[in-house]
Image (cartoon, rainbow, N blue to C red):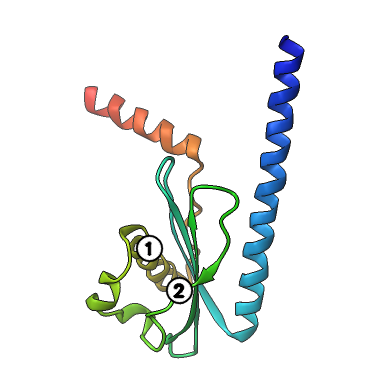
Amino acid sequence: MIITLLVTIAAMFLIQTLLGMGQVKNFNKYYSEMRKEGKVSIGRSKGLIRTGVVLLISIDQKARIKKVKRMQGLTVFTRFKDLNGLEGQHLLKIDEQSLNQFDRFTVKAIIDAQHVYRIVQAGGEPPKPKSPLQSVLQVFKRKEEVNS
């Protein structure tokens, strides 16, 4: 009984890993294609339970948006799709009306892409995203600091 359970867990882990690798391959494919055309800013909005969003924003030399690809969803089956409505706008000066047409997770990813672009333009390196475990531990650390 226990061996069957362990084998099942191992098989599920292996399938999850393979599907995750497929998603990374999809990301690399679109990033490489867009990178050939110029600069690409990446924006993320990620959560443990809610939907996650990854944006690839292709920009020209003047930071005008040429093309946007969005991957949004909860599962490893999510793939990139075109996101229309931002073409021709300056990455750092997207008007409020354009942002209002998107859900809050996409808007958060756009703001993250703007932030990453500013950091890179200033010669810095964007911060690495925290792992889910680091996020959970940070919550407990904050609670501990508040109680102290």
**Image x and y of residue 24, in percent:** 65, 57
**Image x and y of residue 30, in percent:** 62, 71
Q: Is residue 63 above or below residue 82?
A: below
Residue indicated by mark 2: 83
**Image x and y of residue 92, in percent:** 34, 78
Crowding at dot 2, Cα within 10 Å, few <14 / some 14-19 / many 20+, comes out as some
- Quadrant hosting residue 2: top right
User: Looking at the rendering, in which quadrant would you find the C terminus?
Assistant: top left
Q: Amino acid at mark 1?
A: Thr
The residue depicted at 42 percent of the width and 40 percent of the height is 49
Q: Is residue 10 above or below residue 15?
A: above
Q: Is residue 134 above or below residue 117?
A: above
Residue indicated by mark 1: 106
**In terms of sequence position, does the residue under pointer 2 or pointer 1 come before the other?**
2
The residue depicted at 36 percent of the width and 58 percent of the height is 105
Badge nearest the viewer, 2 or 1:
2
Q: Are marks 2 and 1 in contact (CB under 8 Å)?
A: yes
Q: Does residue 148 appear anywhere in the picture?
A: no
Crowding at dot 1, Cα within 10 Å, few <14 / some 14-19 / many 20+, comes out as many
Q: Does residue 75 appear anywhere in the picture?
A: yes
Q: Is residue 11 left or right of residue 55?
A: right
